[in-house]
Amino acid sequence: MRQNDIAAISPNAPVILEMSHISKTFGAVTALVDVSIRLRKGEVLALVGDNGAGKSTLIKILSGFHRPDTGAIVYQGKQVHFGSPREARAVGIETVYQDLALINDLSVYHNMFVGREYHKHVLGFKLLDNKKMRGLARTYLDTLGIEVPSVSSTVDLLSGGQRQSVAVARSIYSSPTILVLDEPLAALGVREGAHVLGLIQNLRQQRSVSIILIVHNYNQVFEVCDRINFLHSGEIVLDASTAETSEEELIRIVKSGLGRQAV
Ligand SMILES: Nc1ncnc2c1ncn2[C@@H]1O[C@H](COP(=O)(O)OP(=O)(O)OP(=O)(O)O)[C@@H](O)[C@H]1O
Ligand SMILES: [Mg+2]
């Protein structure tokens, strides 16, 4: 399904998230400088930029992994301060990290249900309901068309692409309000990448979840995103809807010294 098959997001769609004037340094390294982003309900926002531009740092601040030095986060109309990823997840912000997606020595199905395990009571004891979780994981991965050798395999036996697909599936499973995907396509082959893009496109069509997608390939940005925020050296240098800009424009901006612009 191509971009043009999906109606543009309404300018009246409510703003679900606003991160304003966020700055962050790590010792001598300045990762983010006065960064502001806005996300509407149902919108798919691309965060693009070179290696080290600050993309992961920004989403780790959103997910409670890092604290910002300055700035504010307003989520669903209220200012929030997340002390940990668990706190962000509890209110519906689900993040698939670039570097720490799954727990390698747990099975696929245990990974699917980390932090939201099903239990059963046997003779007064509370035990994990493995059978139920196995069945649900298998059905859910089948529904999404994700192939793994077995849901009982430990994750370290999967290929990088399978692992990435399971991580994305797990994040979608909890029906989040905001889904943050940090380079979900990086480790994927052509077929698996197209599959994950298809999952994102389906979510976009339903317009029920807002997505922040970090991706390097501009082509893919234009395929599945409504809006683009371009980070360079910790600053937003472009904020434009995909309809208002083009791959050529992005390349031109990169080459032209990256002055701050609003399109
Ligand atoms: N925990 C950390 N401690 C020290 N420096 C960090 C830390 N995390 C990120 N940085 C630095 O902050 C800057 C931004 O890094 P970040 O990971 O946000 O970039 P990125 O845009 O996600 O890059 P990539 O495309 O390579 O993933 C880099 O200079 C990086 O070295
Ligand atoms: Mg990164």
Image: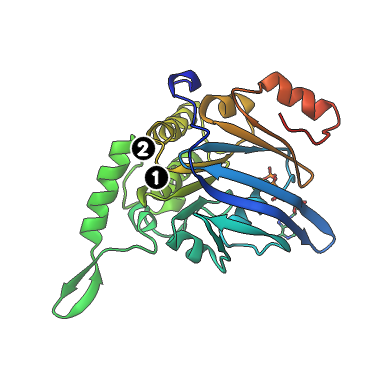
Picture quarter containing residue 232?
Answer: top right
Residue at 54% x, 31% y: name it. Answer: 225
- Work out which residue is located at the far left of the displayed protein and give it: 123
Q: Which badge, 2 or 1, is on the more N-terminal residue?
A: 2
Which residue was labeled with disc 1? 169
Vertical arrangement, residue 110 with respect to residue 180, above or below: below
Vertical arrangement, residue 168 with respect to residue 67, above or below: above
Near mark 1 (Cα within 10 A), the count class, few <14, some 14-19 or many ≥20, is many
**Mark number for residue 24?**
none
Quadrant (top left, top right, bottom left, bottom right) of the N terminus: top left
Give 204 or 191, whichever is nearer the viewer: 204
Vertical arrangement, residue 65 with respect to residue 156, above or below: below
Residue 150 rendering spot, x and y as whole percentages: 31, 46
Picture quarter containing residue 48?
Answer: top right
Side of 7 where 135 appears, left or right? left
Residue at 50% x, 61% y: name it. Answer: 88
Give the residue type at disc 1: Ala
- Work out which residue is located at the far front of the displayed protein and give it: 12
Near mark 2 (Cα within 10 A), the count class, few <14, some 14-19 or many ≥20, is some
Q: Secondary structure at mark 2?
A: loop
Residue 195 rendering spot, x and y as whole percentages: 43, 30
Residue at 31% x, 53% y: name it. Answer: 152
Q: Secondary structure at mark 1?
A: helix
Residue 202 rendering spot, x and y as whole percentages: 39, 32
Give 226 or 54, whichever is nearer the viewer: 226
**Mark number for residue 146?**
2
Residue 6 rendering spot, x and y as whole percentages: 44, 24
Quadrant (top left, top right, bottom left, bottom right) of the C terminus: top right
Instruction: Confirm or deny contact between disc 2 and disc 1 (CB under 8 A).
Output: yes
